Image (tube, rainbow, N blue to C red):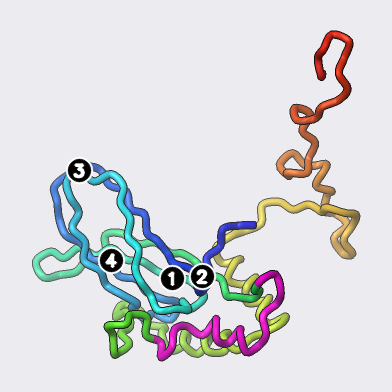
Amino acid sequence: MAHLMGPMDDPVLVHRWVHGKPFDVKLMWVDPINVVTGIYEMHVVENWVVSFHKPTFKKPMRPGKWTIKMIFSHKGEDMVIGQTNFLVIPLAFSKGQPISAQDAVAANSGPPGGIYNTNDFLIEFDREANNTEALAKQAAENSRKAGSELDAWVDGVAEYFWTVEASCTIRGKIPGCEDISPCESTLWSSRSPDPKSELGKVKPDGRLR
């Protein structure tokens, strides 16, 4: 299984640097409907190589594409000097079983009141975004999905971040997908033959091969 992040997980930002003069930056975390979930000040020291940042959010995190912006202030003007995105997958299964419609709404609607930080009382939106209303409406509709609609939502957000390079079947043919090769005939599948790991009978000279 892929290491996917769900609504109840704790994201960690890993940032790498080259040596240079120290300076201050801010890290802004933005959820899929442009809610600013937190702004954190950080002092970059001159000899940093790798460091970590782990925010504390009220759960659940809203599923979809999240954005982290690194902001540098110069003469009173904020500049985004780095940005990355990560995906929070909607919760569709729990303990190996599909979740109920009620649990799906609770897990995929974002934190109570839409507020991620216990010290916040108001919701702040990213001022650079211009599609917040449409995203909020779509997120509300998605949060009520269950069953096959929820599965389709999961597939949709996953396709936004990844594409399938190749596929294979484990057992037999799949109706409508007869052109897909068995995994045993591929070079990349964990089920393809690996002569190096196959052991036979001991030969007269004491060798296994």
Specify the segment rendered in magenta. 95-114
Residue 27 image label: 4
Residue 86 image label: none
With respect to residue 202, does 25 lie above or below?
below
Which amino acid type is marked by label 4? Leu
Disc nearer the start of the sequence (2/3) = 3
The residue that label 3 is drawn on is: 47
Query: In the image, 49: left or right of 30?
Result: left
Query: In the image, 24: left or right of 167?
Result: left
Q: Quadrant of the C terminus?
A: top right
* Image location of residue 191, percent across then percent down: 78, 44
Residue shown at the point (86%, 25%) measured from the top left: 200
Q: Which element carries disc 3, helix, strand or loop?
A: loop
Which amino acid type is marked by label 2? Val
Q: Which element carries disc 4, helix, strand or loop?
A: strand
Quarter of the image where one finds residue 93: bottom right
Q: Are marks 1 and 2 in contact (CB under 8 Å)?
A: yes
Q: Quick one: label 3, few (<14), some, or many (20+) residues within 10 Å?
A: few
Residue 88 image label: 2
Quarter of the image where one finds residue 172: bottom right
* Image location of residue 133, percent across then percent down: 43, 89
Q: Are marks 2 and 3 in contact (CB under 8 Å)?
A: no
Q: How many marks?
A: 4
Query: In the image, 95: left or right of 75?
Result: right
Disc nearer the start of the sequence (4/1) = 4
Which amino acid type is marked by label 3? Asn
Q: Quick one: label 1, few (<14), some, or many (20+) residues within 10 Å?
A: some
The answer to whether residue 79 of the structure is visible from this angle is no
